[in-house]
Structures are given as C-alpha cells and as structure tokens.
Image (cartoon, helix red, strand yellow):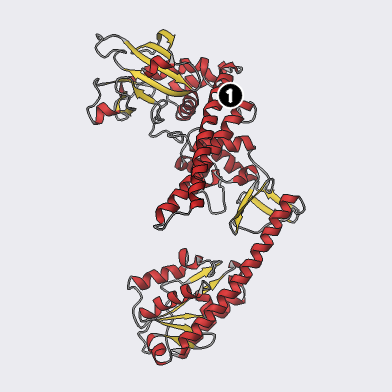
Amino acid sequence: MDANIKVYSYLRFSDARQSTGSSAHRQIEFAANWAKGRQLQLDASLSLRDEGLSAYHQRHVKQGALGTFLRAVDEGQIGAGSVLVVEGLDRLSRAEPLQAQAQLAQIINAGITVVTASDGREYNREGLKANPMELVHSLLVMIRAHEESDTKSKRVKAAIRRQCQQWLDGAYRGRIRNGKDPQWLTWRSDGWQLIPERVDAVRMAIDLFRAGHGAVAIVDRLNAAGLSVSDKGTRATHLYKVFRLPALRGAKTLSVDGVDYTLSDYYPAILSPEDFDELQGLFSQSGRRKGKGELPGIITGLRLTQCGYCGSAMVAQNLMSRKKDEDGRVHDTYRRLSCGSGQAYRRCPVGGSTSIAPIERAILDFCSDQINLDALLERGVVDPPARQKLAAAKARVADVEAQLKRLTDALLQDDGAVPAIILRKVRELEEELEHLRQEVTDADTEWAAVSRKAPTTAEAWRELVVQVKSQDYDARLKARQLVADTFARIVVYRVGVEPGEPANPALDLVLVPHGGHPRALRIHRKTGQWLSAEDVSTRALAG
C-alpha cells in the first residue's frame, strides 16, 4: 500500500454512554495502530462515528455516519484503493446475514479494503478471490453477531411485554425503557417529575396553537419568552408532533412485536383527556391552524366562505403597501374580498370585489349574540359534556382516518395479491368511519344548541370585538377560531341575491351556523350595519 491511500476509521456504540468508556478508546486505538503499522495516515475529513445507533435495527445506516459513508461510496466520493478500519464486522452490521453481507460486498466491490483491526483480517476483492474461505468466515461472523443481537432483542421485548402487562394489571409502577420519553419530564427515584419551565413552554405553545398561530410564530414567541420544549430548543417541524403525543394526557403508547399498549397515568398529565381530544380535533379542521400575513383573515382561508353566485371559495387581499390611516390601520377600502373563481378563471357571472371590513363587522355583531363564548374563557373553567362529546368524536374520526391511510399506503406499495384479512379490515374501518362521522354531526348539533343557551360574557366579547376592529393580530386570530367554531358556511352576495338587481348600498350574507338555522342578513355596504335579518330554511338555501 502506498502513502496516497486514504484510511478511514468507523466507530459505533449501541449505547451512547459507551462513548466515554473503554469501547470508544479501544476502537480508536485499533484504527490508529493499524494505520501507524503501515505508515499510513488516518483521514479525519469524513467523520465516521455512530453513538447510540443500533446495527441490529440498521439505524446507523438509516440516520448515521455509516449510511453517509455508503452513499459516498455509491457516488464515487470514496476512491478505489481506500481502506475502512473497523474493530470487527459486528460494528459494521448486526442485520440479517444476507443484508449484512450485501453491505460488506457494496464496499468491497467499490475497490475498498475493509480491515477488522481486532483480528488483523483484510477483506478486499483480490484477497477473497485468492482465498474464498475468508468470505465464509465473514458470513459466520455476521451470523453470530445477528444471533446475539436477535437473542438480546427477544429478551428485552419479552421483559417489556411483561412490564406492560403488569402495569395494566396494577402490579408494576416502575420505569419502562422503550422509545423516547417527553423532554418536559425527568425520571427520579420515586417516579416521573415535571420540569416546570418545559411544561410552561408546552402549555404556552398549545395555547398559541389553539388561538390560531402557526408553528413558526409559536417558536418565535417561545424564544422571545426564553422558553423551550426540549434541551435542544424548539423546532417548528417538531412542534406538531409534540401536540399529538398521548403523553400530554399522561399516557405512554408503545408497540412490542405488533402488540399495541396504552399505559394510562404512566406520566404526570398536563392536559385533561377532554382537552387532549379537542387538541387532536383541531388538526382535522381545514384552514384552522393559522391565518396568513400581517393581517390574518377572520372569514377567509377557512374553506367556509363562498360566493353566492357560483359557489366558489371567496379570497381576500390586503393591500398592505397602500397608505394607512393615521392610527396605522389599513384603510377599509384596501382590504378586499372577491370570488376566487372569478378572479382566477373568469367563471363567476359576477365580477369585481368589495370591502371585507363591513362584512367582518356584521359577523362580529352576529357572533356577539350567537358565538360559542365558552371558547373565550379559560380552558377548563367551562367544560360542558356536549363539548367533550364533540371533541372525543372528532378525535376518533381522525384516528380511524389515519389507520385507513396507513393501510391504503401499504397496499399501494405492494404489487402482490391483497390478503383477504386486510380487505376485511379496510371495509370494517370504512364502516366505522361512516358511523363516527355521523356521531360528529350529531354531537356538533348538540353542542351548537347548548352553546346558544350558555351564559354569555358580553364584556369579554366586546373587548375582543374592539381589538379586532383595531386590527390587533392576536385578537383577529382568536376571532378567526371562534368563527370556525360557530359557522359551517358563510355565503356572500356582493351585489344582491339576484345578480341582475340594480346597484344598491347593501350586501347580502347567509350565515349557516353548526347545527343551527341559517340566517340571511342584509347589511350596509360601507358600515356593516344590519338593515334586515331573517331565518332561512336549509332546503331553500340548498335550492
């Protein structure tokens, strides 16, 4: 071997704690001694170190340094004649023997020599061609490594299954080491303890999400408050995963050999079951998560405001660059509402746009009588059974939809014949989903009826209305969520119910609340003042 040969060292430990012990030192020493004995220099430009990544589960390939090395080999970045030094083949892989040998062959076929420093063996094409028994030896080593890991894995899984069953039976209340635990908790000798500042961060993030803020805005506010949901900070891409964790309601969920376990009260809960179900329901509401731009829309972007002439979605445009009022607000005439179909495809029989501000004012006035004012109160202060029922039904629908999606995705990826048991399961889930959706409709109707009879907090609502009209960002987001809770549909007629009517100073709206009776409003085009109102039958509206 000449001095131009590049030598790389690969280190791996299945437990990250080994990195500070003798395992790391031993592997580094093996590689250094091997290279030194041949007067070669280790190349540290490509870091090959996997700490706490299992070679049995192939995590070191899927998300670790070895996967990076194999991709570099495939792309020709690691040249032929290079050397990879490992302590032993079991560091390289503990997968099933055929898979492990394929990974070794991938490296060797690229002209790279694999050296196992613990026994001084060298695996390359020339050597294996001259002595094929070395290939048999490598296979035997891989078989033994896989069997050791497989036996250990089975023992660990059996122990976890016993602990789960004992937990369900009430006979065990210790720690079950499986998967990752929430980072707002820490384990003490007497059980799980909440980390107050992390819990504050999670609760603040949930409240902001409920109020309509998106993940990026939530992270910005957490950072401004000096709060984080984990020791690595808060990432927007990770935040929605946190919101879906059953650990929020105190449950640990895990799957062992295809058996699913839900361990209630495993963690200290920071949400009630009802609040957790409601949080999951928010994910299924289209357009619910956030308003966009500097001035988020109250009635647009929710897929509930439509054109009365063609049925298309209405879209809003805020001309933020135009001259603002003395108080810094965007003038009403620069905040426009138009038909999305007419704007993009010229398919609507009525063109043009109208100011959205008077429509918002009229709906705010309507909401001051009809809105679910419970949403304005502190969470948990008002928590009627009807809301719990609706939130639970929505959560079950979301769960069944997720199961159907997983099965459908799996079937699409499999070209073979579909097993009868899978088809039967799909049909059962589809029937269950139809039944659950009807439950949601019934619960929605019940909750709408209850909310109209609920005690009102007019002062709190009036305060929100004033803030919305002053274009306060947070207040508009809150009102947006209240509108989503209240209305199933808002129909806008920009020039009167009949397009052929002569121009008049009025706009016509039809407000369709969840589970309630549709209401037709005629409002002043500039002020939003109610000119007339009447109930509309659902049949007439459909016609």
283 lies above or below 234: above
- Could you say where residue 137 lies in the image, as x and y percent from the top left? 50, 86
11 lies above or below 336: below
Is residue 382 shown to the viewer in this render? no
163 lies above or below 213: below
Q: Quadrant of the N terminus?
A: bottom left
- Could you say where residue 126 lies in the image, as x and y percent from the top left? 37, 89
Q: Nearer the viewer, residue 317 or 112?
A: 112
Q: Amino acid at mark 1?
A: Asp
33 lies above or below 408: below
Q: Nearer the viewer, residue 428 or 504?
A: 428
Which residue lies at the image location 46% right of the left edge and 85% below the top edge?
A: 135
Q: Nearer the viewer, residue 209 or 390?
A: 390
Is residue 472 shown to the viewer in this render? yes
In the visual, does 178 lie left or right of 436? right
Image quadrant of residue 352?
top left
Residue labelled with disc 1: 374
| Residue extending furthest toward the front | 420
- Could you say where residue 253 lies in the image, as x and y percent from the top left? 61, 50
- Could you say where residue 531 lies in the image, as x and y percent from the top left? 39, 7
| Residue extending furthest toward the right | 171
Q: Nearer the viewer, residue 448 or 375?
A: 448
Q: Secondary structure at mark 1?
A: helix
In the visual, does 306 lie left or right of 237? left
Which residue lies at the image location 59% right of the left edge and 72% below the top edge?
A: 149
| Residue extending furthest toward the left | 346
| Residue extending furthest toward the bottom | 130
Pointer 1: residues within 10 angstroms few (<14), some, or many (20+)? many
Which residue lies at the image location 71% right of the left edge and 57% below the top edge?
A: 163
In the visual, does 301 lie left or right of 19? left
Count the numbered circles shown: 1
